[in-house]
Image (cartoon, rainbow, N blue to C red):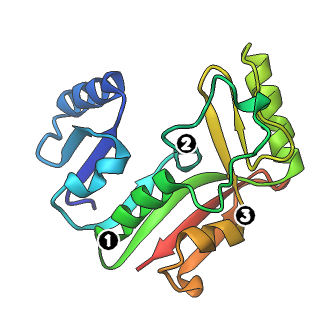
């Protein structure tokens, strides 16, 4: 049913694993895997019917100069009403869509106290040091892990060039932890 599939990742080991799988399945004529940071999506000279970001990837695009080493000691909090990296990536993705194409953000954390607490607990159980607090719309660790949380309003703001009726949200669980987002062109 799929004519062709292009995949990208910024981790070379993941790209190599994907390429090996493509070769084993003998689907090289349908699948191309690129070693590419998402901020350079516009380097792909193609248009797409569907662009998918999987897992919680959309929340992992932290600002370029985020101070992981000393964030909790800063007095001024980071304003994520606009996250330039997220904005750049998804603006490029939207521009790469064919007419009636669609971006599917497979999962995003919902910005609320319950989600924040679960993120922090998860990172702490993995032995990481959480450097953010309840005032932040994201959770970050000293070990450079990052998870941004989103509200519908924040998504509408990031996709201000898209009519709101072209953006839909689907809850992924019964406890308001994550949602799937579809953006239609």
Marks 3/2: CA–CA distance: 17 Å
Query: Vertical placement of 84 versus 66: above or below?
Result: below
In the figure, residue 3 lies in which quadrant?
bottom left
Q: Residue at x 23, y 30 (%)?
A: 19
Disc number for residue 95 = 1
Q: Nearer the viewer, mark 3 or mark 2?
A: 2
The percent coordinates of residue 90 (x first, y second) are 43, 61
Rate crowding at label 1 as few (under 14), some (14 to 19) or many (20 or more) other CA atoms within 10 Å.
some
Tag 2, which secondary structure? loop
Labels 3 and 2 touching (C-beta < 8 A): no
- On residue 151, the disc is 3
Mark 3 secondary-structure assignment: loop
Tell me the SS state at disc 1: helix
Q: Position of residue 143 (x, y in %)?
A: 62, 20
Q: Residue furthest top?
A: 127
Left or right of residue 122, residue 37 in this image = left
Report if residue 58 is visible in the image. Answer: yes
**Residue that mark 2 sits on:** 62
Label 2 to label 1: alpha-carbon separation: 21 Å
Q: Earlier in the sequence, mark 2 or mark 1?
A: 2
Circle 2 crowding by C-alpha within 10 Å: few under 14, some 14–19, many from 20 = many
Circle 1/circle 3 CB separation < 8 Å:
no
Question: Where residue 2 sits: x, y (%)?
Answer: 26, 59
Q: Residue at x 74, y 50 (%)?
A: 137
- Of 88 and 4, the residue lying toward us: 88
């Amino acid at each position: 049913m799929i004519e062709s599939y292009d995949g990208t990742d910024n981790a070379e080991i993941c790209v190599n694993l994907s390429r090996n799988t493509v070769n084993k399945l003998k689907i090289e004529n349908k699948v191309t895997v690129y070693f590419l940071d998402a901020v350079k999506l516009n380097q792909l000279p193609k248009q797409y019917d569907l662009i998918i970001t999987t897992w919680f990837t959309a929340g992992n695009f932290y600002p370029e100069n985020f101070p992981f080493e000393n964030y909790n000691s800063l007095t001024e909090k980071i304003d994520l009403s606009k996250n330039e990296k997220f904005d750049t990536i998804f603006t490029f993705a939207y521009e790469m869509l064919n007419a009636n194409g669609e971006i599917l953000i497979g999962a995003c954390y919902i910005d609320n106290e319950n989600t924040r607490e679960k993120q922090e607990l998860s990172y702490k159980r993995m032995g990481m040091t959480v450097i953010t607090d309840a005032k932040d719309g994201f959770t970050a660790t000293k070990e450079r892990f990052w998870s941004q949380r989103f509200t519908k309003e924040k998504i509408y703001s990031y996709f201000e060039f898209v009519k709101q009726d072209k953006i839909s949200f689907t809850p992924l669980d019964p406890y308001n932890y994550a949602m799937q987002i579809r953006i239609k062109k």
